[in-house]
Structures are given as structure tokens and as C-alpha cells.
């Protein structure tokens, strides 16, 4: 990973992490490259990406970007879509910076 890569992570509590992982990757995959299984996902936004991992009771989302604007785009697009899909379950995405 280049030294300029910025990273943030969100841990979203949900009883259905695999379902939301697949839904998010399928949806975003209509516009950008995405790969997924029920346990792991990857979405490539060009200047950044989002790695997803389904764990018991939590969907872990890890966003990367080549600069601040790219990271914020990944956070916004992935986070806002997940919150919209999970509105009924009141999903909340809170990003926190991670040291590279």
C-alpha cells in the first residue's frame, strides 16, 4: 500500500451482515467494479476502495483513498447506500481513521 493511502473503518452492528454485504456490493457493482461472497466483498472506486467483511453481528467496512477527497467519496457512497438499505434496521455507519 502506498504511504499516501488513507484508511478508515466502520463497524456496523446488524443481525444480517452477509445480506447487507451482498446487497451493497451488487448495487454498487452496477456502476463500479465489485466482487463478493456472503462473507467478503470488494468495491473499487478507482482512487479508493471499500473492503467488506461479515462477522457475527457486525459488518466491517474498510475504506481506502489515495487522498482525502477520494477517501471521503468512498465513505460517503458506501456509507449512505448501506444506511439507506438498512433504514428499517436503523443501521448507522460511523467511520473512524485507521493508521496505515
Image (spheres, rainbow, N blue to C red):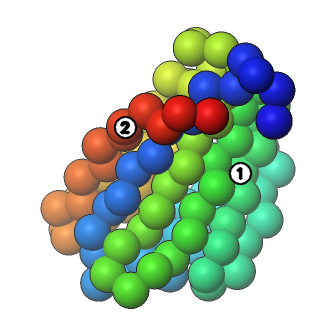
Percent x, y for residue 92? Answer: 24, 52
Query: Residue 93: image x %, image y %?
Result: 31, 48
Q: Position of residue 38 (x, y in %)?
A: 62, 84
Compared across the picture, whether 34 is left or right of 56 comes to right
Question: What residue is rendered at 73% in x and 18% in y?
Answer: 4
Badge 1 marks a residue whose secondary structure is: strand
Query: Residue 76: which disc?
Result: none
Q: Is residue 2 left or right of residue 20?
A: right
Instruction: Indicate which disc residue 43 carries.
Output: 1
- Decide: is 39 above or below 79: below
Viewer can see residue 76: yes
Earlier sequence position, callout 2 versus callout 1: 1
Q: Quadrant of residue 68?
A: top right
Q: Do tag 2 and tag 1 residues touch (Cβ < 8 Å)? A: no
- The structure residue drawn at horizontal position 29% and vertical position 75%, both measured from the top left corner, is 14
Assign a secondary structure to mark 2. Answer: strand
Q: Nearer the viewer, mark 2 or mark 1?
A: 2
Front in this rendered view, residue 17 or 31: 17
Quarter of the figure with residue 73: top right
- Residue found at x 32% / y 61%: 12
On-image quarter of the N terminus: top right
Is 8 drawn above or below residue 35 in the view shown?
above
- Label placed on residue 96: 2
Amino acid at each position: 500500500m502506498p504511504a499516501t493511502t488513507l484508511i478508515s473503518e466502520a463497524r456496523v452492528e446488524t443481525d444480517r451482515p452477509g445480506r447487507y454485504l451482498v446487497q451493497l456490493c451488487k448495487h454498487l457493482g452496477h456502476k463500479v467494479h465489485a466482487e463478493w461472497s456472503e462473507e467478503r466483498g470488494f468495491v473499487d472506486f478507482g482512487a479508493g476502495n471499500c473492503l467488506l467483511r461479515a462477522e457475527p453481528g457486525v459488518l466491517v467496512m474498510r475504506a481506502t483513498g489515495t487522498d482525502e477527497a477520494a477517501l471521503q467519496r468512498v465513505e460517503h457512497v458506501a456509507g449512505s447506500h448501506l444506511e439507506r438499505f438498512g433504514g428499517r434496521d436503523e443501521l448507522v455507519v460511523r467511520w473512524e481513521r485507521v493508521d496505515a
